Image (cartoon, rainbow, N blue to C red):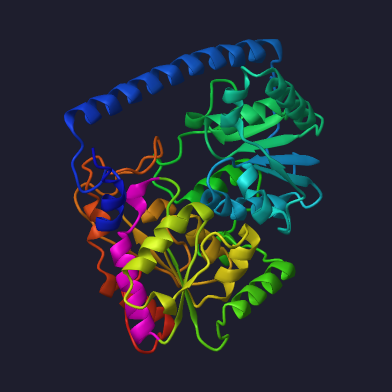
Amino acid sequence: MTDTSHDLASGSGFGKGYDYPPGAGERWRARGQARVKGAAKGVLRAVLGAVGAVDALLHPQFRRPALTPATFHPRRILVIRTDLLGDVVMTLPALHALRLAYPAARIDLAVLPANVALLRDQPGIDRIIACDPEGWLGGVFNAQQRAQLRGAIRELRAQHYDLAISVCGEWAGVVARLSGARRRVGFAGEAYPHFLTDPVPGRRFALGMHEVDYGLALAERAGGSVAPIGDPARLPRLHVPDAARERVRALLAARGISPDRPLVALHAGSGNGQAKRWPLPSWARLADILLDHADATVVLIGAPSDAPLAQTVLRRMHAPARAIDLTGQTTLPELAALLQICAVVVTGDSGPLHVAEAVGTPVVALHGPTNPAESGPVDPHSVILRRAIWCAPCYDSRATAECRFGNPLCMKGIAPAEVAAATRALLHPACDIVGRG
């Protein structure tokens, strides 16, 4: 039997499973897996809900003062955002709002281990904690990992947090409860029963707000000083360390990149579903157009796992030697420094989109299965391109973004010439006019 995965990746630009509708067997397997997963979640919710109910009976709290700077004076605050890189970046305005309200408090941020490096030197954050609660389940059957887990929980509780804010679902709520914090804020629809002391009605992706605004809603419930709509304080902002800037300058100089030509970064990857990816042949065509007509240097960026995608883009270009491939060659702080010196970043709905915006670089964002009103750029200088077909957007956060029809036309319908025009308009704003958002 011939392996067609390479042909699919080379032909469609999406990878195995696309350009062909899923077969009956595959559809039944997917439905079965979804039902099993849903049943397991239901059992877990019932068990942990019972635990929460018992704890609430044993430790009743009859009077809770309002969470405002006038009535609540926390010494230690824990914010939990243990999910993807872009989501963590979009939580920064909420952290800023908390810092304004509680300037004397110590504010810690719990993130996945992979995201620690980017946040380590951010102003207003006192400590970054590496935390992977979903990974805890895999360690319950190993004695050594159980011991490490118990040690991590003891260390968390030893901080004596006064306030914990769960920003990203049920597992973050578990961490908030395990922290022992006296007050725990989060969305009621994203927490196990009785795990929060100050729940906010609803859940993300059901209230019709942007991810930044979800975080700000929780910060406001916790007494944070939230800026009004339109205020620049609502935009994510990242501080780039000088050391990272110096390393990026050296990296670019070693590749012979002139500082006089504008840099355009292209990111073809997506860690949360293939349907969010623009076809690789389209990326190659875009790179060729920019190199021929935009008077810019094209740089391919991404994580080490994106390297095969970048190599496919280069193979499909007419003049691949003119592009610079830095995929997998930068740490997260260095990626932020690289994006900061770029004139424009072109990307799908992925982490680099939000990192680029947070360092002040205009973005051309390509959206398909995800709703840009919930996860797209928030800076008015950025441009959103999408095809509003009947089934898009379809992503609802319960699984990775995959096309149920095996043919993501929402991404295929975005033409390279259209993306090139939007990019050139940001490079040369006096020459082109493009539609915003």
Q: How many marks?
A: 0
Q: Quadrant of residue 134?
A: top right
Residue located at (71% from left, 66% from top): 241
Is residue 284 found inside the magenta-colored segment of the image?
yes
Please state the extent of the stretch shown in magenta in the rendering: 273-294
Question: Is residue 180 among the parts visible in the rendering?
Answer: no
**Measured along the vertical axis of the image, is residue 81 above or below residue 51?**
below
Residue 369 located left or right of residue 121: left
Rendered view: 414 above or below 277:
below
Quadrant in the picture for the N terminus: top left
- Depth check: 347 or 55 in front? 347
Q: Is residue 356 above or below residue 10?
A: below
Q: Residue at horizontal 57%, vertical 76%?
A: 341
Magenta stretch: dominant secondary structure? helix
Q: Is 434 included in the stretch rendered in magenta? A: no
Q: Quadrant of the C terminus?
A: bottom left
